[in-house]
Amino acid sequence: MLRVPKAIAPMKDHDFKAHGLFKDDLELLFRDALDIPDLSIERTLGGMSNINLLAQSEQAVLVLRIPALMIEYSASHFEQEFRVLAEMARKGLSPHPLLCGVLDDDNHTPFLAYHYEPGVVHSQLDSMSHDELRRLKTCLEQLQPLGVSGMPFYSTAIEYLHYLRARADSFLSGSESLSEKMKRTMVSFNELHRSLEVILDEVNWSGTAMHGDLRPSNVIFQDDRVLLLDWNELCEGTAHYDVAYLLSEPMEPFLVDIPRSFASRDSAEMLRLRGLALFSCISWTLERLIRCELRQVTAMLSNEDSVQSMESYVRIKTTQLSQILNQL
């Protein structure tokens, strides 16, 4: 029997519009692209960089991914992620991809389709048991020696910080029309970057594969294995960053003691890595806020509640990063 998530209400056509397409439009386009005549889109599965849709037919349950930003994309937008998914699926670390390509709409919207995997997904870190954390640690250890063609390489923590900063610079291009509030926020962001750069020279960067976006919602716990989602930030860096990111990314404070074996690093070094992780969280969220101001984000992900939530997130994570910098 097919198992599908029950937590999110079924999606109605008038509830959804992305890239100028309603639910019925997307169903027709995906039926043609995937050659599955009875495919139906059931509901959204969340997402910020991308819009993830749950779809099913008599033969399969799939996740369909399209970009969340209303900007021009290349036809190869999802090709690298498809290659990563294919390799990691062979290793038993991710769902199996089905197809990537472009839809036959006016914008030639890129898409990625992969098989839906049922399991337990925690919305909060506190709800993960010590046994699940132990299993996740084993999964990350399996990931460390792996590589995929075209995977970025960062030789030091400072080099990875510079990548995050360069990414921020790239989306600031042409953003002269930003609000005064956002301009002040970017001044604070630049100050955090300079302060963080000073303390990262002492971080032991192991040269192993890291997922790069290890938030609770990107982890699926099954009976016999742990699967990871959203591999866009996969790179060669250090696996210890993934632990730091998992502890730092969620909005809520982490109140449960982490097993020593899971975060087995010097406390000062883990603080530095958590500072780097927090900077990544802030950088990504600022990018989304700026793109919201520039009206480049689909309306369903840029409403007033979403913007307020992201502004609150930036304030909280900036405070946490400042506290870490004061401790080191």
Image (spheres, rainbow, N blue to C red):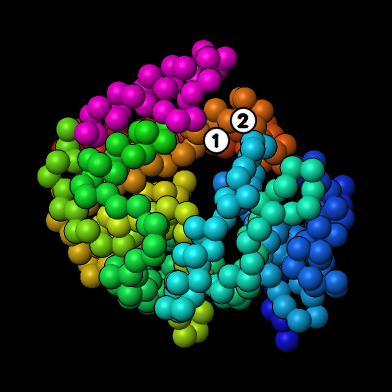
Mark 1 falls on what kind of element? helix
Amino acid type at mark 2: Cys
Instruction: Name the residue carrying label 1.
Output: 288
Locate residue 258: give its quadrant: bottom left
Instruction: Name the residue carrying label 2.
Output: 292
Range shown magenta: 169-197
Nearest the camera: 283 or 131? Answer: 283
Q: Is residue 318 rendered to the left or right of residue 294?
A: left
Q: x, y percentage for residue 216?
A: 47, 60
Mark 2 falls on what kind of element? helix
Q: x, y percentage for residue 77?
A: 57, 50
Q: Is residue 136 rendered to the left or right of residue 43?
A: left
Q: Residues within 10 Å of mark 2 (few under 14, many from 20)?
A: some
Is the C-beta separation of discs 1 and 2 under 8 Å? yes
Q: Is residue 317 visible?
A: no
Residue found at x 22% / y 40%? 158
Residue found at x 50% / y 71%? 86
Amino acid type at mark 1: Arg
| 3D distance between C-alphas at marks 1 and 2 | 6 Å
Q: Is the residue 308 above or below the residue 226 in the image?
A: above
